[in-house]
Image: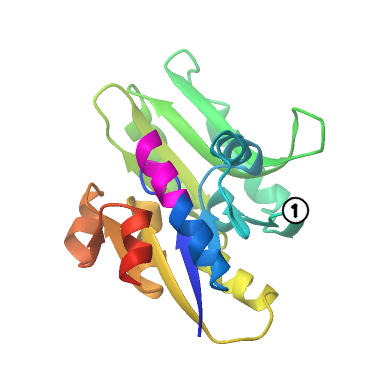
Amino acid sequence: MKKLLVSDYDNTLFTDEKQILKSIENIKKFQEDGNIFVISTSRSWKSIKKEIDKYKIPFDYLCCNTGGTIFNNKGDNLFIGNISDTTINKVENILSKVNTRNISITRYGIYKEYEEKINKILGYKIKGNKDIEKIKEELEIKLSNEFEIILKNEKNCNKLFLNYKLNTKENGIDRLIKLLPKSDYKVITVGDDDVDFNMLKKYNGYRMLNSSKLLIDNINKTVNSVDELIKIN
């Protein structure tokens, strides 16, 4: 049975430069044995590609935008989970009232080739300390049926993530399996944050030792690195 290993990137595959280079060597061996390695990330293709090029990470597929897009290792886009213009307009209407002096808004999405402008918005990250709770409350009232809304409280800056409910990491894996040649796959997943939770619950999940409280309380299997995960599987 082929193994399909799906790893989050930030604070999972990448914890520090020494560890990622060690993991990369075992990923290569994992692939040589006929297995498939996938990076699943909230980052856009443009963002994660910089990391891949920097560390020469061998991958077979990328699930970007929290499962909203899928790419193969040639850079071909295999799937885009578009959000309707009506839904985007609802979000933008709420954000248009935000005081941008206290808040920064990042729009994640698909870029047309060679252009900086986003062609399709697939998710949001809102950073700041003031007004974050108010923004979260309004978004939950008007958009909780359509978006997964996650607030991360950090020392210097709070982060609010809007992930479209149809574009999730576990749905990204479901879609990828349908795109692969028909076979039985042993799916193994690893992550560290709330956004990884459903992926780990559904697909044989391991959490990193340094994980969010949600994962610590609910995911029993732990690893220190992707390198260790490959060795025990």
Q: Residue furthest left?
A: 217
**Residue 148 locus on image (x, y percent):** 45, 54
Q: Secondary structure at mark 1?
A: loop
Q: Residue furthest top?
A: 101
Could you tell me what secondary structure mostly forms the magenta stretch? helix
Q: Nearer the viewer, residue 29 or 219?
A: 29
Would residue 28 be found to the left or right of residue 19 on screen? right
Q: Quadrant of residue 133?
A: top left
Label 1 crowd (10 A; few <14 / some 14-19 / many >=20): few
**What residue lies at 53% left-to-right and 72% top-to-bottom?**
33
Q: Is residue 68 above or below residue 138?
A: below
Looking at the rendering, the stretch of residues picked out in magenta corresponds to 13-24
Q: Quadrant of residue 123?
A: top right
**Residue 144 locus on image (x, y percent):** 45, 54
Would residue 159 be found to the left or right of residue 87 on screen? left
Q: Is residue 185 above or below residue 83?
A: below
